[in-house]
Image (cartoon, grey):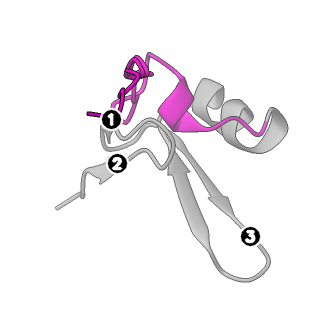
Amino acid sequence: MPRIYQCDFCRYDIPPGTGRVFVKNDGTIFRFCSNKCFKNMFVLKRKPRKLKWTKVYEPKLPKPEKTENKGA
């Protein structure tokens, strides 16, 4: 029974028989759904939290406005 893995960059499911596996010299295994995810992680060194097309995207929240407290 083939397993369904998650892409290590975008966190989408990888259908069996597709994707790309990258193994580092220390034995760490990375699984990617596409060449786009592989390049963004290793070639361009991007963070998945900053890209809108990933599942782990975290939009920037507006900064709270500072209010001046006058001594009472």
Q: Residue at x 36, y 26 (%)?
A: 70
- Determine which quarter of the picture holds residue 40: top right
Viewer-side residue, 40 vs 4: 40
Q: CA distance from mark 3 to mark 1?
A: 22 Å
Q: Earlier in the sequence, mark 3 or mark 1?
A: 1
Asked if the stretch drawn in magenta spans residue 54, the answer is yes
Q: Which residue is mark 2?
A: 6
Task: Identify which amino acid the numbered label 3 is placed on.
Answer: Lys
Which region shows up in magenta?
Answer: 45-72
Q: CA distance from mark 1 to mark 2?
A: 6 Å
- Pointer 1 with pointer 2, Cβ within 8 A: yes
Q: Residue at x 43, y 21 (%)?
A: 63
Q: CA distance from mark 3 to mark 2?
A: 18 Å
Task: Identify which amino acid the numbered label 2 is placed on.
Answer: Gln
Q: Is residue 57 visible?
A: yes
Q: Residue at x 79, y 77 (%)?
A: 25
Q: Which residue is mark 3?
A: 24
Viewer-side residue, 59 vs 57: 59
Taking the image as shown, residue 4 lies to the left or right of residue 26, namely left
Label disc, if present, on residue 12 of the rendered structure: 1
